[in-house]
């Protein structure tokens, strides 16, 4: 049985001290299942099928969160 990458990423975020909301879980699911490179508007459209409370602002904030170095990584530089 193949491991679910969204679950692994969710656990990694939690281990890093990030609060994983249902909106963030929806975005992770969309990202890990994407066969392309969707922009924020497309991520929003796809993730809204999983959680209709998701706003475009949340997509942008979450993308920033996922691309920012963790506090642990920032202290290593």
Image (cartoon, grey):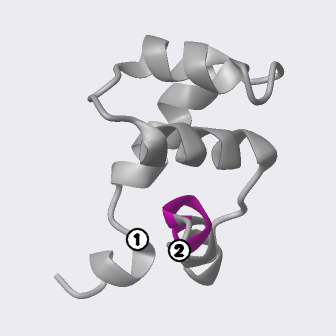
Front one among 3 and 74:
3
**Residue 28 image position (x, y, % from top left):** 55, 48
- Badge 1: how crowded within 10 Å, few (<14), some, or many (20+)? some
Residue at the spot x=55%, y=77% of the render?
A: 1
**Position of 1 compared to 34: left or right?**
right
Compared to residue 46, the image places residue 30 above or below, namely: below
Residue at the spot x=55%, y=28% of the render?
A: 59
Q: Which residue is mark 2?
A: 3
Residue at the spot x=75%, y=29% of the render?
A: 50
Q: Which residue is mark 1?
A: 70
Front one among 64 and 47:
47
> Is 8 covered by the magenta stretch?
yes
Compared to residue 72, the image places residue 37 above or below, namely: above
Furthest-left residue in this view: 77
Tell me the quarter of the picture where residue 42 sits: top left
Q: Work out whether mark 1 precedes mark 2 in sequence or the reverse, and give the earlier one.
A: 2
- Badge 2: how crowded within 10 Å, few (<14), some, or many (20+)? few
**Position of 33 compared to 36: left or right?**
right
Q: Element type at marker 2?
A: loop
Q: Are marks 1 and 2 in contact (CB under 8 Å)?
A: no
> Is 56 covered by the magenta stretch?
no
Compared to residue 23, the image places residue 73 above or below, namely: below
Residue at the spot x=72%, y=62% of the render?
A: 19
Q: Which residues are magenta?
A: 5-9
């Amino acid at each position: 049985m193949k491991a679910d990458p969204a679950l692994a990423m969710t656990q990694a975020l939690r281990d890093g001290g990030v609060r994983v909301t249902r909106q963030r879980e929806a975005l992770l699911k969309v990202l890990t299942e994407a066969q392309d490179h969707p922009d924020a508007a497309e991520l929003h459209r796809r993730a809204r099928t999983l959680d209709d409370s998701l706003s475009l602002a949340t997509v942008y904030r979450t993308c920033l969160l996922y691309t920012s170095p963790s506090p642990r990584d920032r202290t290593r530089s």
